Image: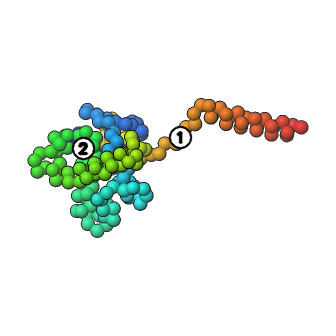
Amino acid sequence: MEEFINFNSQYTVVDAYATSTLGKGSKPLTSFAAWLYDRYLNGVEGSGPALPSFDFSNAYGQTSNSAANFQANELQLAIWVAMGYTPSEIGGEVGGWYDMYDGKVAGWESAYLSDVNNSLWSGTGDVYILNLQRSDNGRNAQDQLIRHPMLPVPEAGSLLVWLTVAGTCMALVWRKSMA
């Protein structure tokens, strides 16, 4: 993991709706990673199915900063694993960061597979990767997951019908005003 983000720096958006990360070792957005992020956001927002075994009442350290940081690290590790990062890329020395936070990954994967098998989740939903570069030097910054529902674009046939209806209505109004 060679990319970082500093919230006091400016960044340029390379792609707001990417399906893979930038940089060496580019990783595709997987269905499991998207599910983890979607279920986390649902829990924070209090809408839809939430990430199991995550204490949303303490998501931001409302009762315990150390517990909030620990579960945030568990989620971060799960997302990295789901994206295909290896223990050595994450910091997988025995007893290291990877080993410390991998307790919930298997349980979340089981819940994800249950949702997939019961047709409650497919693909990557409306989760995308926001590719960023530093504005000052053009280096890749740490990509961010985002959730953005895409509005459906009408297919060409429907668009043509509605434009024809609108044009006819406008012509009738114009014709009536000229009479």
Front-lying residue, 65 or 48? 48
Front-lying residue, 29 or 2? 29
**Residue 24: x %, y % from top left:** 25, 32
Kindly indicate the quadrant of the structure image that contains residue 85. Answer: top left
Per the model, the C-alpha gap separating discs 2 and 1 is: 31 Å
Q: Secondary structure at mark 1?
A: loop
Residue 179 can be seen, yes or no:
yes
**Residue 100: x %, y % from top left:** 16, 53
Residue at point 52%, 42% (across, down): 151
Q: Residue furthest bottom?
A: 63
Residue 133 can be seen, yes or no:
no
Residue at point 89%, 37% (across, down): 179
Q: Residue furthest right?
A: 179
Residue at point 39%, 40% (across, down): 123
Of callouts 2 and 1, the N-terminal one: 2
Residue 104 in the image: above or below residue 33:
below
Front-lying residue, 125 or 166? 125
Q: Characterize the local packing of mark 2: few (<14), some (14-19) or many (20 or more) Cα atoms within 10 angstroms.
A: some
Q: Which residue is mark 1?
A: 152
Residue at point 67%, 34% (across, down): 161
Kindly indicate the quadrant of the structure image that contains residue 133. Answer: top left
**Residue 143: x %, y % from top left:** 33, 41
Residue 138 in the image: above or below residue 112:
above
Q: Which residue is mark 2?
A: 81
